[in-house]
Image: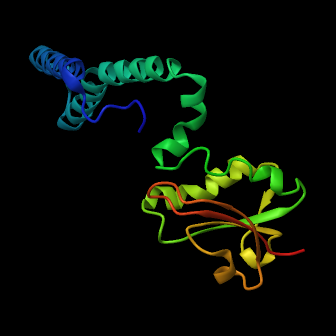
């Protein structure tokens, strides 16, 4: 995820160790004073202490760090973070909304020539965001338009009329806009 480190790091590790040490100290004090009446209550106390003292400070620190990072993002990074994380070019569908009338429907299709699985899965969401307020519908044959990435729309809906093609870009295949129903 954007802005989330792959490991706790030195500070996070120190906070976790301090929390666990505090858990052990409190646990020993409770045992010596005899404040734990039964084995079951002892286990419940141990779990609660481990969560509250061991993980609580670390989780609070992580939230502060995440908020600090995300609030420092610029307008472009905030707007395009989702597509970028999914290996999508945020501008992939720029200009498509102007070609599809606002009241029309569309469907999306993604071919296997799109190199990254997260990008294939995220493409319909990018279309939903880019083409709003147009409405996405299920089967391509029931849509007014078909937005196809890496697959010729005529192979999905025979007789579809390709009206626009965004050319191939690096490893990414072309994107087609086809009129399905007149």
- Nearer to me, 131 or 149: 149
Residue 127 is situated, as x and y percent measured from the top left of the image, at 67, 54
Q: Is residue 96 above or below residue 62?
A: below
Image side of residue 114 versus residue 144, left or right: left
Rendered view: 93 above or below 109: above
Query: Which residue sits furthest bottom?
Result: 158
Rendering coords of residue 126 (x, y %): 63, 51
* Depth order, front residue of 101/37: 101
Residue 34, x across and y down, in percent: 14, 19
Comparing 82 with 48, the one in front is 82
Which residue: 28% across, 26% down?
A: 55
Q: Locate residue 88 relative to residue 157 in the image: left or right.
A: left
Looking at the image, is 86 positioned above or below residue 124? above
* Rendering quarter of residue 165: bottom right
Which residue occupies 33% across, 22% down?
A: 56
**Colour logic:** rainbow
Residue 76, image x and y in percent?
58, 29
Q: Quadrant of the rendered structure where residue 154 is?
A: bottom right
Residue 3 lies left or right of residue 27; in this view the side is right
Locate the N terminus by quadrant.
top left
Number of marks in the rendered image: 0
Residue drawn 70% across and 53% down?
128
Q: Quadrant of the C terminus?
A: bottom right
């Amino acid at each position: 995820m954007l802005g989330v480190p792959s490991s706790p790091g030195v500070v996070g590790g120190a906070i976790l160790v301090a929390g666990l040490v505090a858990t052990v100290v409190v646990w020993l004090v409770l045992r010596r004073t005899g404040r734990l009446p039964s084995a079951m209550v002892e286990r419940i106390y141990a779990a609660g202490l481990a969560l509250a003292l061991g993980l609580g400070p670390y989780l609070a620190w992580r939230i502060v760090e995440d908020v600090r990072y995300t609030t420092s993002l610029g307008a472009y990074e905030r707007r395009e973070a989702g597509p970028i994380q999914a290996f999508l070019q945020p501008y992939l569908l720029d200009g498509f909304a102007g070609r599809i009338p606002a009241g029309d429907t569309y469907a999306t299709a993604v071919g296997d020539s799109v190199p990254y699985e997260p990008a294939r899965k995220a493409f319909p969401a990018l279309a939903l965001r880019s083409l709003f307020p147009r409405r996405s519908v299920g089967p391509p044959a029931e849509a007014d338009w078909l937005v196809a990435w890496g697959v010729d729309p005529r192979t999905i809906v025979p007789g579809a009329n390709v009206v626009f093609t965004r050319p191939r870009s690096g490893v990414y295949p072309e994107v087609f806009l086809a009129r399905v129903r007149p």
